[in-house]
Image: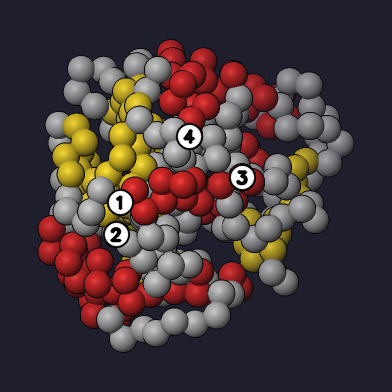
Amino acid sequence: MSDSTAPGEERGAWYVDERCTNCDVARQLAPGLIGEAEGRSRVLRQPRDDAESAALYAAAFACPTRSVRRSGGRVAPAYDPFPLRLDDRVLLCGHHSPHTAGATSYLVRRPGGTAMMIDTPRFAEGLAVRYEELGPVTDVLLTHRDHTAHGRRWADRLGARLWIHEGDLDAAPDADRVLRGTDPVEVADGVTAHPLPGHTEGSVLYLADGRYCFSGDSFYWSRTTADIEVAESVTWYSIEELAASLARTADRLRFEWLLPGHGDRRHLPAEEMAARLRRLTARVATLRPRPIDFTAVRW
C-alpha cells in the first residue's frame, strides 16, 4: 500500500509525541526509522518506500501510548497489520498495553488449527474478532504478574484457560490453571512451562516445539550488546534467585527463537542460542542486587 492513499488521512510527517515512555517497542518494529534520543523514541527520518511506511504503521499500532503519529490526520485503522506473522507458527499480537508496561504478546499456532496466546495485547472487541477468525485459542499463558492486566478478559472472550504461577497468583487469583514449584510442566503437547523465579517470584518461560522460547521478562535480546541479557536493574524479586533459576534451567532449554515480553527478539541456530544462554548464566551468577533504574536497561 502507498501511504499517499491511506483512507481517511491527509499526508503528513511521522513523529513521536511527548507521551512516549521509551519502552523500545517502536524501535524494534521500525529500526533505522525510529531511534532513541534524550530518553525517548524519535523519528529519525521519514519513510522512503512502502516497506518503510508499513514499518511505521506497525510501530504506530503497537505503541502502548499511541505516541507514533502522523501530522495532519489520524493513523488509519485500515493500516493496522496485527496480528503480524513472525514465522510459520508465531504471530506478534501488537497493540501493546500501558497496563502491562507495554509488554509484547504472541500467538503460537498448535496442531489441529488451535493456538495459544502468551501474555496479552490490550483488549478490544475488534481485536478479539480477529483472533477468533484465526481459529480457537485454547490457552492464555501469563509469564508473570506485570503482564496480567487483560488476561482474564481475553481468556473469557476467547473461551480459553488462563495460566499463571502460584508465586504471582495474587495478580490473577481467578486463573484456571496454577503452576506450582520449580519443575517444568507440560501444559500442552509440545509446550512446556519452566518456572523461573527472579524477575518476579512467579516468573515463567514457555518453550514450544523446541523452537520458541517465550521468556517473559526473564531475559531478552539486546541490540546494544548483541547478546542475550537480563534486565538486572528492573529485577523486582531477586537477581540471586534469577541466577539460581538459570543455573537450574538453562541446560534444559533448546530453542531457535527468543521471544521476550520486553526487549528485542532474535532468531539464531539452536546451538548458538544454547551457548549464549550458558554464558548468560555464568554472567548472572556474578550479579548482586542493585537499585531499580529503568534507564539502565540495555535495549
**Secondary structure category for the residue under label 1:** strand
- Few, some or many C-alpha atoms within 10 Å of disc 4 (few <14, some 14-19, many ≥20)? many
Three-letter amino acid code at the position of disc 3: His
The residues bearing labels 3 and 2 have C-alpha atoms spaced at a distance of 22 Å
The residues bearing labels 4 and 3 have C-alpha atoms spaced at a distance of 11 Å
Residue drawn at point x = 64 percent, y = 60 percent = 22
- To which quarter of the image does residue 192 belong? top left
Residue 251 is left or right of residue 25, and the answer is: left
Question: In terms of depth relative to the viewer, which is nearer, 185 or 173?
Answer: 173
The answer to whether the residues at label 2 and label 1 have Cβ atoms under 8 Å apart is yes
Task: Work out whether residue 140 can be spotted.
Answer: no
The residues bearing labels 4 and 2 have C-alpha atoms spaced at a distance of 20 Å
- To which quarter of the image does residue 105 belong? top left
Question: In terms of depth relative to the viewer, which is nearer, 166 or 288?
Answer: 166
The residues bearing labels 4 and 1 have C-alpha atoms spaced at a distance of 16 Å
- Location of mark 4 (residue): 151
